[in-house]
Image (cartoon, rainbow, N blue to C red):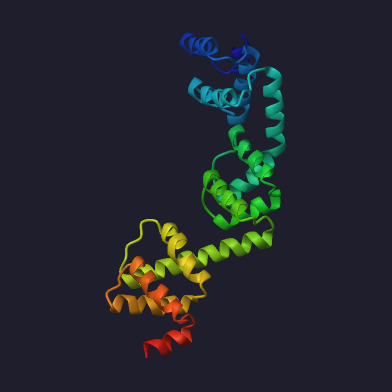
Amino acid sequence: QQLQEIFPEREISVSEYGHYMSFLEEQPIRQDALIMIVRYCREYTNDPNINFKYVKTTALNFIQRGILTAAQVEKELSFYSKDTNNLRQIFRALNLKRKPDVADGEYLKAWRKMEFEFENILFAASRLKRGNLEKLDAVLKELYANRCFSREEIDYYLSRKEALLNETYRIAKKLGVYLSYAETYMEKYTSGWAALGYSDEALDSIADYSFAVKKRSFEGMDEVIRNWYEKGVVSLESIQEHLA
């Protein structure tokens, strides 16, 4: 009767009732808590024809987080309601077309624990331009590991990373190397070379030289750089003099 009241537009089938009853028998969630979740799903989707599979996925998300009673579900939905607008702003920044749901709120909780202010989370999302919450989560974890929390710190870190990635692709093209995942090469080689003091122009010049002397790989170019670095050949001017 409670389920039918949630779906006045249609009659719930016997098999659909069976799915709900079996779920209650198999899972530790309370019946009144499940009813609240069903009502939430119905109101969230505004779809009288949502199936049990959709409700089951949402309910399992609650169960996995130990939310089993009506009081716990009510508290969780209350938290979600407060953050819905924030999530919508993040979704717009990421160009995500779907609506946020309760599970998405878990990301916000985690990011707050990492001490990120919402405005800076939104800024990081806008820098991604297109992506999803998993990608944004990975970026924020990377920023957290590097202690970048303010807008200025985030902007500098992401801009520098983008520049290093572009330089990595440029070097690969000069060496004739195909990159399936540029970040690996950026972390292992390009960022290290930049830390030694080599500018983008200097690295371009070394890449051309490495190709000419058949050191046509990042490993080969690294050998050249390590050898030249010991001789103090770092600036573009010193490289040009050395080559001459």
Task: Point out residue 181 in the picture as x, y percentages from the top left corner.
Answer: 39, 56
Task: Point out residue 66 in the picture as x, y percentages from the top left corner.
Answer: 62, 23
Vertical order, 227 against 57 (above or below)? below
Question: Residue at point 67% right, 63% down?
Answer: 152
Vertical order, 105 against 226 (above or below)? above
Which one is nearer the viewer's eye here, 47 or 101? 101
Image-based side of 68 in relation to 172, left or right: right
Which one is nearer the viewer's eye here, 210 or 86? 210
Vertical order, 8 against 153 (above or below)? above
Question: Residue at point 60% right, 26% down?
Answer: 65
Task: Point out residue 27 in the picture as x, y percentages from the top left corner.
Answer: 54, 15
Which one is nearer the viewer's eye here, 44 or 26? 26
Q: Quadrant of residue 45?
A: top right
Q: Point out the image quarter for the N terminus.
A: top right
Q: Point out the image quarter for the C terminus.
A: bottom left
Q: Quadrant of residue 159?
A: bottom right
